[in-house]
Image (tube, rainbow, N blue to C red):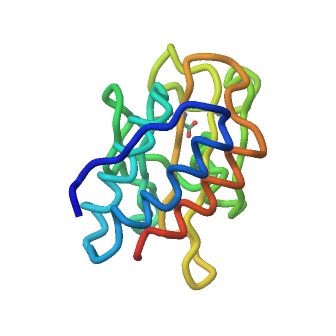
Amino acid sequence: MAEEISIHKGTKSEKYEALLPQIKGLLSGETDRVANMANFVAALKMTFGFFWIGFYVVRDKELVLAPFQGPVACTRIGQGKGVCGTAWKEKRTLIVEDVNTFPGHIACSSASKSEIVVPIVRNGQVVAVLDIDSDDYATFDKTDAIYLEKLIEQIYW
Ligand code: SME
C-alpha cells in the first residue's frame, strides 16, 4: 500500500476511529519492530500534532529510548522512575494532567505539561511503553487511554 495516511477532522474519538484501520494497514506485513514503532509515532504525530510521542523499550533493568517524534529526550529511565518507569512497574496506563504534581516526574523538556504513558504487555511482561507529552495541561483522558491501548495492540512484538 502507499505509505500515507489521511488526517480526519472531528472529535478526538473520530480521529482515533479513523486512525485505527490506517495503523492496521500501515503495520500489516511488516514484522520489524523499529520500522513499525517509527511509523506508529509518525502517524500519531500527523493526526494529533502532539508535542512529543515516542517509545521506550525494556532493556534489562531500564527503559531505553526508541523511535520518537519531537525534541530530543532522555535516553534511559529506571523501573519505577518517572511516569514511564511507574507505568512499567505498575503495568498500567497512567494519565497525568499536570506533570508538576507527579512525584518524580522526569522533565525531558520544560515545555511538557501533561502526559500519558501506555505500557505494551506481551505474555504478561511489559516490553515497552508508549509515552506522549503535551505542552498543554490535561490533554489526555480515558478516551486516549482506550484508543491508544487498542492501537498498540497492532504492533507485532
Ligand atoms: N516525562 C517522562 C520522561 C520521558 S519524556 O517525557 C520524553 C517520565 O517522567 O517518565
Which residue is pictured at 55% across the width and 65% down the height? Answer: 120
Q: Quick one: 130 or 83, which is closer to the camera?
A: 130
Which residue is pictured at 71% across the width and 46% down the height? Answer: 94
Q: Quadrant of the C terminus?
A: bottom left
Q: What percent of the width, then of the height, locates residue 31?
A: 28, 77
Q: Quick one: 29 or 122, which is closer to the camera?
A: 29
Which residue is pictured at 39% across the width and 43% down the height? Answer: 6
Q: Is residue 141 above or below residue 145?
A: above
Please tell me how many numbered marks the rendered image carries.
0
Q: What percent of the width, then of the height, locates residue 51?
A: 46, 25
Q: Quadrant of the N terminus?
A: bottom left
Q: What percent of the width, then of the height, locates residue 79?
A: 57, 56
Judged from this view, the residue extending furthest toward the bottom is: 123
Q: What percent of the width, then of the height, locates residue 49?
A: 45, 28
The reply, left or right, for residue 103 in relation to residue 124 is: right
Q: Quick one: 147 or 118, which is closer to the camera?
A: 147
Q: Is residue 123 above or below residue 132?
A: below
The reply, left or right, for residue 154 in relation to residue 6 is: right
Image quadrant assignment for residue 119: bottom right
Q: Quick one: 120 or 145, which is closer to the camera?
A: 145
Which residue is pictured at 36% across the width and 32% down the height? Answer: 73
